[in-house]
Image: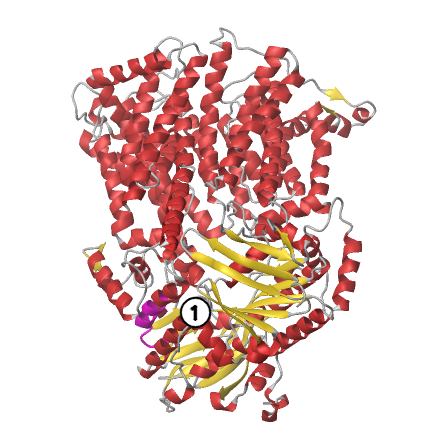
């Protein structure tokens, strides 16, 4: 048994309100791909941040090639050959690719030309197509990730840690990334990637560490396990999964929401939405698939009224609502669960009850002689807390103190009530643990059963397939096609998401 | 007219010291809202040092030290204690105002005639000052102005062509990226704040021992804030700071000139006194988009 | 919650005490004994009804300027221009009173003047909100600059249109007694403006925490993006918040001109705006807290003035005390967060150990 490349022994980490890691021990060999699997909040990111020197462990030791090491900062981690690419990239959007890569790796006067050449060469070596002069803010997320990887390679890393790397990629881009991982490890380097996606783990990992509630609850070779076993380890119990069979097949034929030839012109000249048309029926879930950044945000925003289209019309139950702004649309019964709840959907520093008021502060139902009827609001909030099993001490609890899943439940509860006719869900389960994901799915199905129209935008294909009656694929602001969900396979949808037109993609590809 | 332009350069000097200081510090994310207090402390210390020692150099050195201390307090509270930058700056400005009057009294008592020192002399540069027009305006100034002639392009070069400049600019845009690259963000920020203290101290001292020759409690009168505004309006770029400074220096030079020829009904003195401030307001309205450093004003907190 | 409140009170009181102690130490530089100086201060403040009442007289305009800063602060906006809005209010108060004092009955003039100062100060402030909403200008800079412009306007008017009939000094004529704000305690300078100030504090508190509008203002202050996404027009809120803020500061001009000075002179109350910010910070933006913090600063002002009359102690001791107190209060914010985090961490470790 050769000495492990890196080893963690007995690592514990406590934060002010939570135990992030407790007695975590595992090792990684050279040339090995290790998957760190677990739900959100399981402690995977934290333990890797300790290895990368961003956090300091409260207990435990670290070893490299059998020698004890101390990693007090990312700089020391890098000296040991460790690099980490986090979910939220550590890139400066306002600077160029070159400037980002040399940050921290250069001293004195900067010879721009020299570095540009170096980076171009390195990129070609790994088959990355990058222009060193591009500004990060102009690059697609998948390309930004390549810049992050290139930065790690520039620093001659031997252990590459990646946190949820495929979250922002198309299936094909994810394939490319996995290819890179295999090439990289074939050279004797190691990769740890943090994920909650079982399929990915089974396809590329050599060994899997499963974490739950801050502890390691499984250390298994990929060849010796399967998805079912892994998922049981991850959540610790069996879950009732939402499956296609559970759903009614029939859809009410009446159209409720019509999006007619909508174009949204951005200042940069390229339209964010280009002449799209969609029809949403009563009692239907229309799934919108696509890689982030292809117009999903704009689609949600024109439905909820945050932006007005440059061309085209929106009709609700036959009525033209194109010119109506957000407040009017709320009154008309359009609910919106945004992708980024902390910036668009909730006020973190206010209480649960106050957050419930957010969209209906103009509504007379909450007012008594001109003042806010606090009693009524609290009662309502309390009811929702019970109905949605929100883990919170009272309606007065501050939103920031709730877990991500519970925060999302608050938004859900509110929007489901506000959205009497249409509800738009944008990435409703991102960052939630499996229990919460299941709960959200059940809520969505319940609303569909009530006859509401649901627009479901998601980058999680499993979610799209599990819930949607019909699926539309969004690519560069245009609709690549609307299909009944039974017609599509992962392969086909992947190709559509990457821009191939319907005629170029045959069903045999599945 | 020549006199006016020459005055512009002279009055613009302290403003540019302050504006450049703000540009560098704000690029790391620190709005040095204590700048008015730094200027004032510099003016006070410069006068005290200059008067008591008889040497202006001592005065300026003391001013730099004083500015450093004030900036250090601001930096400590905002960077390490992570407190609110605007609130802290206002508090420090208030404290410094009280300290300067009080300590002036402690040291000098209540003099019957105002105490004065001889302000900075103009040093004409041989040859260059003989150039018609430009020579009079640009090369017949005091030593501080000549220093700023060098500092301005130097700060531009530093900010855009060196690694420290890249680090500074990145710290205000995405401090996490800098942290992850192994650089201590807090130290970078603190360093630029201290630098702002030194430069601001010199700027303040210009007013007391460089120009007026004495110290009054109102001597700064909002000019620290004008330097702050110039940084903003100059889009956090030394080039813009220079242009902004020329504009404000000119406004101030006109104000002084108009006051010397007395009041007129159509153009009362007060209008010229208010000119720089009105200008600032108009300029904040007209520029459509500013490249504000993304994390300006946000304390850097590692989730630890 | 108990622990948090206890922390708040203790650290604030400690901050105030430390501020006073620090200023006292500075007195040593002058060769004065701080203990005896403070001793005289305390006895002279309480010995005399007039002096004691003066604390509240001084607190009155401070409450208004503090409310002005705190109000926009709740909307995440910085109104640094309260001093200027105060000047505008003062100018309007003087002009309106002088113009109407011989034409209309006193009480009517007072009401009209009050309304005019509200509108005047409000519009002067709303301009800032408008340019913020329309052009996304930096309201910090615009509000700060507007003070200097207001000062210039006031000085100009005092030298020209509003100048006294004697034409000797840049100041207005004295206001007729009919338009003086009535005294509420005879033998003192305490006038009805104080009641107005307290009512304003309560009113602002009710507005912010009990009404839908106040809710919307706070929502915009916490997270303008989320508020906009929820149908709240943040731009309208900016303008409204600055109007109310400016109006509040403007009313301070009314209380000072009609209640205390009974005329308008140059250079009076030059630090109301800054002190108001300090008070708002001390009270953490809470309107009810502002009542007490303003009274504290009023006491510091009266105390400082008395000390200033004692030979050898400069009046700048007031600013010194205010400055020290403010800095210590900011440090107390840090201490409270640190205490809170430590408490949570210890709770956690106890739970883990079980």
Q: Where is residue A257 in the image (x, y as percent from the top left)?
A: 40, 80
Q: Which quadrant is home to the C terminus of chain C?
A: bottom left
Q: Where is residue C154 in the image (x, y as percent from the top left)?
A: 41, 29
Secondary structure type for disc 1: loop
Q: Magenta includes A422?
A: yes
Q: Above or below — where is C72 with respect to A193?
A: above
Q: Residue furthest right?
A: B127
Residue in the image at 65% along x and 72% along y: A177
Asked whether the viewer can see residue C149, the reply is: no
A151 displayed left or right of C330: right
Residue span colored magenta: A411-423
Please say if A20 is above or below B139: below
- Principal secondary structure, stretch drawn in magenta: helix
Quadrant of the rendered image containing residue A423: bottom left
From the top left corner, tell me how far across and down residue C71 is, in percent.
Answer: 34, 43
- In the image, residue B292 lies in the stretch drawn in magenta: no
Question: Which residue in the rendered view is the most extreme toward the top?
Answer: B112
Q: Which residue corresponds to the image point at 55% horizontal and 84% vertical from the top-left?
A: A490
Disc 1: which residue: A433
User: Depth check: A361 or A92 in front?
Assistant: A92
Kindly identify the residue that appears in the image at 46 percent across and 44 percent down.
Answer: C139
């Amino acid at each position: 048994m050769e000495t492990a490349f890196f080893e963690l022994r007995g690592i514990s980490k406590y934060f002010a309100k939570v135990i992030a890691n407790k007695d975590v021990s595992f090792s990684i060999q050279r040339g090995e791909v290790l998957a760190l699997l677990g739900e959100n909040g399981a402690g995977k990111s934290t333990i890797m941040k300790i290895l990368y020197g961003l956090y300091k462990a409260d207990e435990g030791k670290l070893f490299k090639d059998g020698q004890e090491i101390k990693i007090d900062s990312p700089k020391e981690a890098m000296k040991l050959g460790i690099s980490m690419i986090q979910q939220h990239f550590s890139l400066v959007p306002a600077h160029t690719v070159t400037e980002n890569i040399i940050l921290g790796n250069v001293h004195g006067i900067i010879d721009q030309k020299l570095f540009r050449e170096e980076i171009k060469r390195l990129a070609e070596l790994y088959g990355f197509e990058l222009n060193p002069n591009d500004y990060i803010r102009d690059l697609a997320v998948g390309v930004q990730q390549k810049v992050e990887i290139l930065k790690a390679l520039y620093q001659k890393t031997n252990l590459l840690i990646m946190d949820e790397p495929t979250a922002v990629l198309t299936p094909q881009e994810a394939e490319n990334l996995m290819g890179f991982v295999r090439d990289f490890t074939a050279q004797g380097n190691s990769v740890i990637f943090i994920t909650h996606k079982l399929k990915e783990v089974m396809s590329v990992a050599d060994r899997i560490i499963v974490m739950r509630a801050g502890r390691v609850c499984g250390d298994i070779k990929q060849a010796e396990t399967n998805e079912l076993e892994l998922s049981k380890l991850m959540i610790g119990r069996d879950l009732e999964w939402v499956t296609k069979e559970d759903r009614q097949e029939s859809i009410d034929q009446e159209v409720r929401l019509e999006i007619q030839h909508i174009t949204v012109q951005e200042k940069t000249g390229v339209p964010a939405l280009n002449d799209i048309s969609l029809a949403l029926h009563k009692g239907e879930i229309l799934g919108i698939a696509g890689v982030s950044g292809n117009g999903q945000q704009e689609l949600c925003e024109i439905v909820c009224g945050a932006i007005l289209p440059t061309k085209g019309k929106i009709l609700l139950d036959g009525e033209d609502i194109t010119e109506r702004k957000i407040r009017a649309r709320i009154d008309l019964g359009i609910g919106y669960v945004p992708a980024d709840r902390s910036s668009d959907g909730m006020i973190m520093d206010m209480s649960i009850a106050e957050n419930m008021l957010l969209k209906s502060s103009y509504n007379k139902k909450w007012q008594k002689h001109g003042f806010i009827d606090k009693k009524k609001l609290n009662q309502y909030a309390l009811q929702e807390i019970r109905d949605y099993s929100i883990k919170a001490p009272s309606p007065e609890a501050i939103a920031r103190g709730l877990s991500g899943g519970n925060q999302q439940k608050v938004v859900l509860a509110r929007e489901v009530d506000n959205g009497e006719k249409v509800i738009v869900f944008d990435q409703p389960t991102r960052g939630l643990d499996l229990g919460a994901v299941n709960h959200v799915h059940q809520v969505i199905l319940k609303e569909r059963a009530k006859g509401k129209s649901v627009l479901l935008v998601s980058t999680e294909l499993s979610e799209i397939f599990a819930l949607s009656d019909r699926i539309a694929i969004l690519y560069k602001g245009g609709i690549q096609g609307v299909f009944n969900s039974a017609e599509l396979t992962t392969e086909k949808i992947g190709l559509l998401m990457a821009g191939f037109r319907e005629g170029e993609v045959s069903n045999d590809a599945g | 007219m020549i006199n006016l332009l020459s005055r512009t350069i002279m009055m613009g000097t302290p403003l540019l010291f302050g504006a450049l200081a703000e540009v560098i510090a704000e690029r790391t994310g620190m709005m040095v809202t204590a700048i008015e207090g730094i200027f004032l402390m510099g003016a006070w210390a410069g006068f005290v040092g200059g008067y008591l020692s008889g040497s202006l150099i001592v005065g300026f050195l003391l001013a730099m030290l004083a500015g450093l201390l004030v900036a250090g307090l601001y930096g400590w509270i905002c960077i390490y204690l992570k407190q609110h930058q605007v609130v802290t700056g206002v508090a420090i400005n208030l404290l410094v105002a009280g300290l300067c009057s009080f300590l002036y009294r402690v040291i000098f008592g209540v003099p019957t005639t105002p105490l004065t020192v001889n302000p900075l002399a103009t040093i004409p540069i041989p040859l260059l000052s003989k150039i018609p027009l430009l020579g009079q305006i640009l090369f017949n100034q005091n030593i501080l102005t000549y220093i700023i002639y060098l500092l301005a392009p130097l700060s531009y070069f530093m900010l855009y062509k060196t690694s420290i400049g890249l680090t500074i600019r990145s710290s205000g845009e995405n401090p996490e990226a800098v942290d992850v690259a192994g650089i201590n963000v807090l130290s970078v920020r603190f360093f630029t704040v201290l630098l702002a203290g030194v430069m601001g101290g010199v700027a303040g001292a210009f007013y007391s021992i460089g120009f007026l020759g004495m110290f009054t409690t109102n001597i700064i009168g909002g000019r620290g804030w004008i330097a702050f505004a110039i940084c903003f309006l100059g889009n956090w770029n030394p080039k813009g700071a220079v242009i902004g400074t020329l504009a404000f220096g000119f406004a101030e030079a006109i104000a002084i000139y108009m006051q010397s020829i007395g009041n007129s009904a159509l153009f009362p003195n007060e209008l010229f006194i208010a000119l720089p401030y009105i200008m600032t307001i108009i300029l904040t309205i007209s520029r459509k988009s500013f490249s504000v450093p993304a994390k300006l004003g946000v304390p850097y907190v590692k989730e630890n | 919650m108990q622990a948090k409140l206890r922390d708040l009170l203790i650290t604030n009181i400690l901050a105030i005490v430390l501020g006073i102690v620090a200023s006292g130490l500075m007195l040593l530089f002058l060769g004065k004994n701080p203990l005896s100086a403070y001793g005289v201060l305390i006895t002279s403040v309480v010995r005399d009804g007039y002096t004691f009442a003066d604390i509240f007289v001084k607190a009155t305009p401070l409450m208004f300027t503090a409310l002005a800063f705190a109000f926009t602060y709740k909307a995440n906006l910085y109104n640094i221009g309260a001093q200027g809005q105060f000047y505008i209010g003062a100018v309007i108060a003087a002009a309106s009173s002088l113009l109407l004092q011989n034409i209309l009955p006193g009480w009517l003039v007072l009401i009209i003047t009050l309304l005019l100062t509200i509108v005047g100060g409000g519009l002067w402030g709303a301009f800032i909100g408008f340019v913020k909403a329309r052009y996304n200008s930096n309201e910090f800079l615009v509000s700060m600059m507007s003070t200097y412009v207001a000062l210039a306007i006031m000085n100009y008017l005092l030298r020209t249109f509003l100048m006294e009939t004697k034409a000797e000094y840049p100041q207005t004529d004295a206001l007729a007694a009919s338009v003086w704000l009535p005294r509420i305690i005879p033998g003192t300078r305490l006038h009805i403006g104080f009641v107005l100030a307290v009512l304003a504090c309560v009113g602002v508190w009710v507005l912010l925490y009990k009404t839908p509008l106040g809710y919307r203002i706070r929502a915009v202050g916490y997270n303008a993006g989320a508020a906009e996404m929820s149908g709240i027009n943040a731009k309208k809120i900016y303008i409204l918040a600055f109007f109310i803020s400016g109006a509040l500061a403007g009313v301070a001009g009314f209380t000072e001109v009609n209640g205390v000075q009974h005329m308008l002179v140059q250079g009076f109350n030059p630090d109301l705006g800054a002190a108001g910010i300090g008070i708002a910070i001390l009270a953490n933006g809470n309107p009810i807290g502002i009542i007490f913090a303003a009274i504290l600063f009023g006491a510091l002002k009266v105390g400082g003035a008395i000390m200033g009359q004692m030979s050898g102690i400069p009046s700048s001791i007031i600013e010194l005390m205010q400055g020290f107190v403010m800095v210590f209060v900011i440090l107390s914010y840090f201490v409270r967060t640190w205490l809170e985090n430590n408490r949570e961490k210890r709770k956690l470790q106890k739970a883990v150990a079980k």
